[in-house]
Amino acid sequence: DDLWSTSIMPQIDKIVACTLTLCQDKVPDRPNSHELFGYDFMVSDSKGKPKVWLLECNSCPARDYSTPVTCALVKQMMEDTAKVVVDLPKNPEGPTGEWKLLKDFDFAKRRCSLAR
């Protein structure tokens, strides 16, 4: 089994989509601007299956090249952010890199309850 795509990533997707949905009325709407949030997760073993835990969400995440891993992640994030912020308004069907659009999240099939 590919646990990343079958178990871990779907949990991360749900947590991110739900937290953004649940707090969207608390984030001021500023036309022609965007906000970057940083999520920290932990993965544990729960009855033989991975369980994702949200540790924190930051409204101003670090974007420095402090390690080889963060260097690669930050560079990719900056490139993909340009695709979403600059390119996507001109081409709504264009690539978003590793970003997923909330409009693609199927809220009808998934409850926005983070409690289990």
Image (cartoon, rainbow, N blue to C red):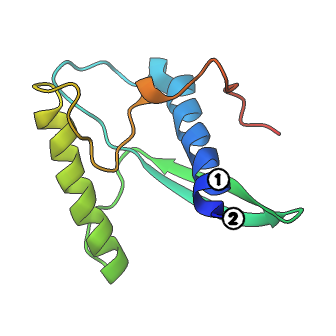
Q: What residue type is labelled 1?
A: Thr
Point out the image quarter for the N terminus: bottom right
- Residue 67 vertical placement versus 45 (above, below): below
Residue marked by disc 2 = 1
Residue 54 visible in the current orientation: no
- Asked whether the beta carbons under mark 2 and mark 1 sit within 8 Å of each other, the answer is yes
**At 53% across and 24% down in the image, what residue appears?**
21
Mark found first going from the N terminus, 2 or 1: 2
Point out the image quarter for the C terminus: top right
Q: Which residue lies furthest to the right in this view?
A: 47
Q: What element carries label 2?
A: loop
Q: What residue type is labelled 2?
A: Asp
Q: Residues within 10 Å of mark 2 (few under 14, many from 20)?
A: few
Q: Which of 89 and 116 is in front in this view?
A: 89
From the viewer's perspective, tell me whether residue 49 is left or right of residue 16.
right
**At 15% across and 25% down in the image, what residue appears?**
89
x, y percent for residue 34:
25, 33
- Residue 97 vertical placement versus 17 (above, below): below
x, y percent for residue 55:
61, 55
x, y percent for residue 37:
39, 44
**At 50% across and 31% down in the image, what residue appears?**
20
x, y percent for residue 80:
23, 49
Which label number is shown at residue 114? Answer: none
- Residue 73 vertical placement versus 7 (above, below): below
Q: Nearer the viewer, residue 115 or 106?
A: 106
Residue marked by disc 1 = 6
- Residue 98 vertical placement versus 35 (above, below): below
C-alpha distance separating marks 2 and 1 = 8 Å
